Image (tube, helix red, strand yellow):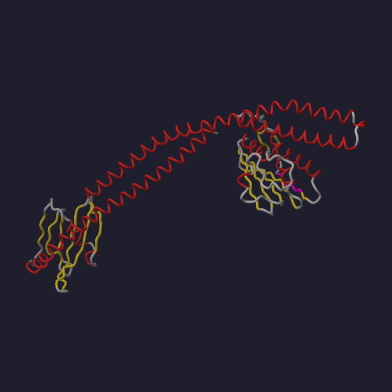
Amino acid sequence: MFNQVKAKLTMLYSLSLLCVLFSFIGLLYFLISDEIIEKEIDEIKVYYNKEKSDFIEDLHDRKHHSLEYEPNRAIFYYVFNPQGKLIFGEESLPTLDSWLVKNPKIDGQSFIERVEWKQYHLLLVKKPLTLNRNIYGYVILGMNITSEKHLIQSITWTLIGLTFLFSLLFAGLGYYFAGQAMKPIRNAFFKQEKFVSDASHELRTPLSIFYSSVDLLLREEKDKLSDYGIEVLDDVKTEANLMRSLINNLLLLARSDKNQLPIERKDVNLSRLLMAIYKKFSRIASKSIHFEQRIQSGVTLSCDEVKVQQLIYILLDNAFRYTKEGKVVLSLQSKNGITTITLQDTGCGIPSKDLPFIFDRFYRADLSREKGGAGLGLSIAQTIVTAHGGEIHANSIEGEGTTLTIIFKE
C-alpha cells in the first residue's frame, strides 16, 4: 500500500515538474524566436529607409533585368516595377528570384513573412517604393534566418533532453524522500494495525466466556430471576453478540491489511447461492418492501462461497435497513466473462457529499439515521470484493435510492 502511495506521489510530482518545464521551454522558445525576428525586422527596415531613394532612382535608370549574386550578403533585396516585373536586385540564394516571381504574394500589399524555401528559413519584408504619394514599384527585402532557426531548435532540444534527464533524477530523489517522509506514517500505521489485531485476539476469549456465562445464566437461573433481571441479561447478551461481531469484523480487516485474508476458491453455482439468499430474506422482509430477484440461471464463479455469502448479506442488510417502503432488487448477470451482481433499492439514498466515503471504515453517512452497525459493513464488503480481484461501485440519489454494483472478471 505504501509503495503504491510513494509511486503515485512520485508520478504526480514528476508529471507536474515536466508540465512546468515544458511550459517554460515553450514560452522561452517563442520569446527568443520573436525577439530575434523583431531585431531582424528592425534591421531590414533600417536598410529599407536608407536605400529607398536609391531603389527609386535605379528604377528610372535600369530598363532591363539585372540581378547580382553575393552569397555572404546579410540582407538581400529584389526591386519590382508597379506591374510586378523584377527589374534588379542583389541576392544571396540562387534561383530565389524565380520562386518570388511565381509567388502570388508579391502582387499584394506590404507584408512581413517567415517562409520556408527548400532547406532555408527566410524572413521576407515587402515595402512599396513611394515618393510624393507616387508609387514607383515595390521591393522585397529578406534575410536568411536558417542558422538562427537551427540554433533556437538546437537549444530547445537540448533543454528538452535536460528536462527529461533531470525529471528522472528528481523522480528518483522524490521516490526516496517520499519513502523517508512516510516512515513515521508507516510505523504509526503498523502499530495501529498490530494494536487492532492484538486487541481483537485478546478480547475474543474473555468476550466468548462472558457471552457463554450470560447465556448459561439465562438458561439455568431463569426461574430465579425477575422479569426485569431477565430483560437486563437479554440486553447484555445482545450487546455482547454485537461486540463479538465487531471484533470478528476488525480481525477480518486486520488480516486484509496484512494480505492474510484467507480466500478458499472453488467453482460455486452463484445463481443457486443468490437464489437461496433471496428466499431467506424474502421470508423476513417487511411487507412494505417488494423484494424482487433478476437472477440469471447457470452462472458459476470461482470464489470463496462463505465470503461471497457474507458480502451479499451485508449489502442486503443495508438495503432493507434504509428502505422503509418501496422496492429492493437483487440481480445477477454474466456475459463475456464478466459477472455482475447488482443490488438496487428505493430507500433514503446517500447524499452526494458522503458517497465517496461510504467504503471507509467506521464512516456513517448520517449519524441521525437508524443505528445498528459500527460502519464496517461496506468496508468489509469492499475488502471481500477486492480479495476476489473484483470491483464494487455505488451510485445513489438522496431520497430516491441506491444502487451497488459488483463486477467479477474471469
Where residue 222 appears, x then y in whole percent?
A: 90, 31
User: At x 20% / y 63%, what residue is drawn?
Assistant: 126
Q: Judge left or right: residue 129 versus residue 320.
A: left
Of residues 288 and 273, which is closer to you in this image? 288
User: At x 71% / y 34%, what residue is drawn?
Assistant: 246
Q: Judge left or right: residue 149 versus residue 336.
A: left
Q: Judge left or right: residue 397 versus residue 87.
A: right
Of residues 320 and 115, which is closer to you in this image? 320
Of residues 174 and 258, which is closer to you in this image? 174
Where residue 48 appears, x then y in whole percent?
A: 16, 62
**Majority secondary structure of magenta residues:** strand
Of residues 147 and 35, which is closer to you in this image? 35
Where residue 101 appears, x then y in whole percent?
A: 19, 62
Q: Judge left or right: residue 56 versus residue 103.
A: left
Q: Which residues are magenta?
A: 291-295
- Residue 375 inside the magenta-drawn segment: no
Q: Is residue 202 above or below residue 272?
A: above
